[in-house]
Image: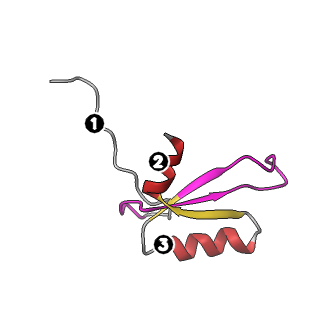
Amino acid sequence: MSNEPAEAALSCSAKGCRAAAVWVLAWNNPKLHTPERRKTWLACEEHREYLGHFLGVRGFLKETVPLTEWQAREG
């Protein structure tokens, strides 16, 4: 038996939400980050649109992709 902790499930970034994440919202703040830099928020189905809108109205949202696709890209 391993003494290493089990990998924690990825949960939604919405305040107070503990649902499993299924989406990645990649964003950056052009006043703070270089154009190629991507910060990420995770979202469950329920909060994907809300979080996307929050980032979108500020001009921060760059892309929204399924978590499995993002993980495959990142290796």
Magenta: predominant secondary structure element?
loop
- Tell me the SS state at disc 1: loop
Q: Quadrant of the N terminus?
A: top left
Report which quarter residue 54 is drawn in: bottom right
The residue that label 2 is drawn on is 72
Q: Secondary structure at mark 2?
A: helix
Residue at 77 percent across and 56 percent down: it is 29
Q: Is residue 22 magenta?
A: yes
Residue 5 percent coordinates (x, y): 29, 32
Q: Secondary structure at mark 3?
A: loop
In the rendered image, the residue lying farthest to the right is 31
The disc at residue 47 is 3
Q: Kindly identify the residue that appears in the image at 51 percent across and 52 percent down.
A: 70
Q: What's under tag 1, amino acid-wise?
A: Ala
Query: Residue 75 magenta-drawn?
Result: no
For image coordinates 41% across by 64% down, the residue present is 17
User: Which region is colored magenta?
Assistant: 17-41
Corner quadrant of residue 8: top left
**Amino acid type of the residue that numbered disc 3 sits on in the rendered structure:** His
Q: Which residue is mark 1?
A: 6
Percent across and percent down for residue 40 are 59, 53
